[in-house]
Image (cartoon, helix red, strand yellow):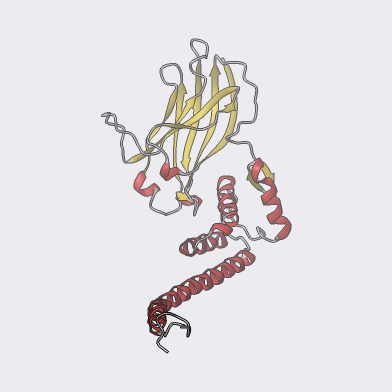
Amino acid sequence: MENQADKKKITWVIKNFASLPSKIIYSDEFVVSGCRWRLEALPKGRNDNEDDYDANHFSLHLAAADSQILPPGWRRLTKFSLTVVNQFSDKLSQVKGLEKCFNPCGPYWGFHNMISLSKLHAGDGFMVNGEVIVAVEIDVLEVEGKLDVPEESSPVMETVDVNGFQVLPSQVESVKRLFERHVDIATNFRSKNPILKTSYMNVLLSLTQTLCQISKDDLADKYAVLAYLKDAGFELGWLEKKLDEIKEKKEKEEACVARLQEMGEQLKPLKRKYADMEAQIDKVKAELSAARVPDVSLYDDNVVV
């Protein structure tokens, strides 16, 4: 038996949460204590006639990802906590913990009723910009029987530190540009929680990257997100100015569209009057043509001299 302490914290950002199907979804696998793990979730709850399942709750579990190929008698004594992150306030995050022995009879453990779906969708910070962030903190206490798995970085937790914020490799350049252009952007940022810091940065990046696609109807939500980020300590006067410019342009665009529609309505009767006048002109021209005396010659047979 191998005794060891190997504590890790993993985050999983679930995108487009509201549009996910009801079937089970899986995080990428990650390695702790030479063992592969993954998170398993039911975005829309579960109802299979078992008393401890509830179709009105989000279900979240930690699972031994390689349980099917582990040697007989394998076990992993593990203390872990699962969190549904509140992206507005870390104090409001939903946290539940267990100490369990993972083995062939129990390859996954967690909570069927992690958080109610109504609370998750209430707009109180658990789902922001369509994203739900969950986290697991694992402390592997004992391991018996495992595969030779290298301690490699997992896509779930592969992050890079940029000015104290853990971001995905694909986000590094964007975050670096933010700090290069706005040096004091996070000088007064208050939260020290790494998960919450990552969440805030994701929200900020999402806001800056969608400025070009903002519609007038989206502006109120974007200003709310901006206020939320400013409350956290970000210096975002430059971003507020950008939003104000976009708001002004959208209002001007809306005013121009409304004026064009008004002018179009005013033009309709004029077009009808113009068409009627054209018809009358054509009618008078025809009458004029019929009334004209035809040209005759003195030598015409029908002319009497």
Q: Residue at x 60, y 22 (%)?
A: 34
Quadrant of residue 189 within the rendered picture? bottom right
On the question of residue 195 being in view, the answer is yes
Q: Give the farthest residue toward the bottom.
A: 305
Q: Residue at x 39, y 81 (%)?
A: 302
Q: Nearer the viewer, residue 163 or 190?
A: 163
Q: Quadrant of residue 8?
A: top right
Name the quarter where the C terminus is drawn: bottom left
Seen in the image, is 182 located left or right of residue 216?
right
Name the side, left or right, on which 297 lies relative to 200: left
Q: Residue 132: x and y, percent?
A: 47, 45
Q: Horizontal and vertical percent for residue 90?
A: 50, 50
Residue 268: percent from left, percent from top = 40, 76
Residue shown at 58% from the left, 20% from the top: 3
Where is 207 relative to 33, above or below? below
Count the marks.
Answer: 0
Residue at 59% in and 27% down? 31
Q: Locate residue 62 relative to residue 197 in the image: left or right.
A: left
Q: Position of residue 278 (x, y in %)?
A: 42, 78
Look at the picture and state if 226 lies above or below 293: above
Q: Quadrant of residue 258?
A: bottom left
Which quadrant would the N terminus be assigned to in this image?
top right
When the figure is inspected, residue 151 is found, relative to residue 160, above or below; the finding is: above
Instruction: Answer whether residue 183 is visible to the viewer in this image.
Output: no
Q: Nearer the viewer, residue 301 or 240?
A: 301
